Image (cartoon, rainbow, N blue to C red):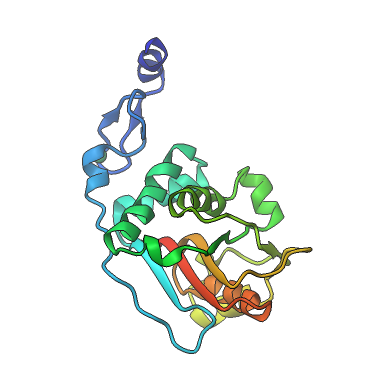
């Protein structure tokens, strides 16, 4: 209690949405409850055709300013406190769409970072989200994929075709692993979908039969 009081005094924190001061005694001290409640969950999803991915499920939209700020802070400022609320959006989406039961027997695989980015950041945001979602779905989380080559951050490439080229050959199956039949790939954001597609193609080649993507926000 005293610790939170002192933290509030010395390092005041402000809501990413409305800039209101937030107390450290609040569990998610990055976004206030009323701003978080304003994040709208998506409805439904569409099955894809002619790709290794059956569908991409997205909890929210990247255009949503609060969600976008939350994801950026989580990723670039390593705000670990955002792990649970962001994962909760995906969990709430799965609950709302009655999808939790659909994924029994699936293995959850986070999209890996390059080693360099992983070391810079200290964590892989997709892996943190995957663990939370895995605990909810009761599915094991396995680092099935490994990053093979350096590529530029997809977010810095505007053109879809170029994104595809940039990410081509970026992943391989982790050494010593066999691909399970059913997989959910987890990433924080998907814009063009090129990263998820590339990862799914590698797993499909390795024998996977049913692959879904699940992201917190779709651009
Ligand atoms: Zn707020």
> Which residue in the rendered view is the most extreme toward the right?
176
Labels in figure, total: 0
Residue 82, placed above or below residue 62: above
Q: Quadrant of ligand 1?
A: top left
54 lies left or right of 145: left
Residue 78, placed above or below residue 211: above
Quadrant for residue 15, please give it: top left
Residue under the image location 48 percent in, 74 percent down: 193
204 lies left or right of 190: right
- Where is residue 111? Give x, y as percent: 58, 61
- Where is residue 189? Give x, y as percent: 45, 61
Residue under the image location 48 percent in, 53 percent down: 138
Residue 42, placed above or below residue 123: below
- Residue 61 visible in the shown view: no
- Where is residue 195? Give x, y as percent: 55, 71
Residue 146, placed above or below residue 21: below
Quadrant for residue 151, please give it: bottom right
Residue under the image location 23 percent in, 46 percent down: 37
Residue under the image location 24 percent in, 57 percent down: 40
- Residue 136 visible in the shown view: yes
Q: Quadrant of the N terminus?
A: top left
- Where is residue 91? Give x, y as percent: 37, 53
Q: Quadrant of the C terminus?
A: bottom left
């Amino acid at each position: 209690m005293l610790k939170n009081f002192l933290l509030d005094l010395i390092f005041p924190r402000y809501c990413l949405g409305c800039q209101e001061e937030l107390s450290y005694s609040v569990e998610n001290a990055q976004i206030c409850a009323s701003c978080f409640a304003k994040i709208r969950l998506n409805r439904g999803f569409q099955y894809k055709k002619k790709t290794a991915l059956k569908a991409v499920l997205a909890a929210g939209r990247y255009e949503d300013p609060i969600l976008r700020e939350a994801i950026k802070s989580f990723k670039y400022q390593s705000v670990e406190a955002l792990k649970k609320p962001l994962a909760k959006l995906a969990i709430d989406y799965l609950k709302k769409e009655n999808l939790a039961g659909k994924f029994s027997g699936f293995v959850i695989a986070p999209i890996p970072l390059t080693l360099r980015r992983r070391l810079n950041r200290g964590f892989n945001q997709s892996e943190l989200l995957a663990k939370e979602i895995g605990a909810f779905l009761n599915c094991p989380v396995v680092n099935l994929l490994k990053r093979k080559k350096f590529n530029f951050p997809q977010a810095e490439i505007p053109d879809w075709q170029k994104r595809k080229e940039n990410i081509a050959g970026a992943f391989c199956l982790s050494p010593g692993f066999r691909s399970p039949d059913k997989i959910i790939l987890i990433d924080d954001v998907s814009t063009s979908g090129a990263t998820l597609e590339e990862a799914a193609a590698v797993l499909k080649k390795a024998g996977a039969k049913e692959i879904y993507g699940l992201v917190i926000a779709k651009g």
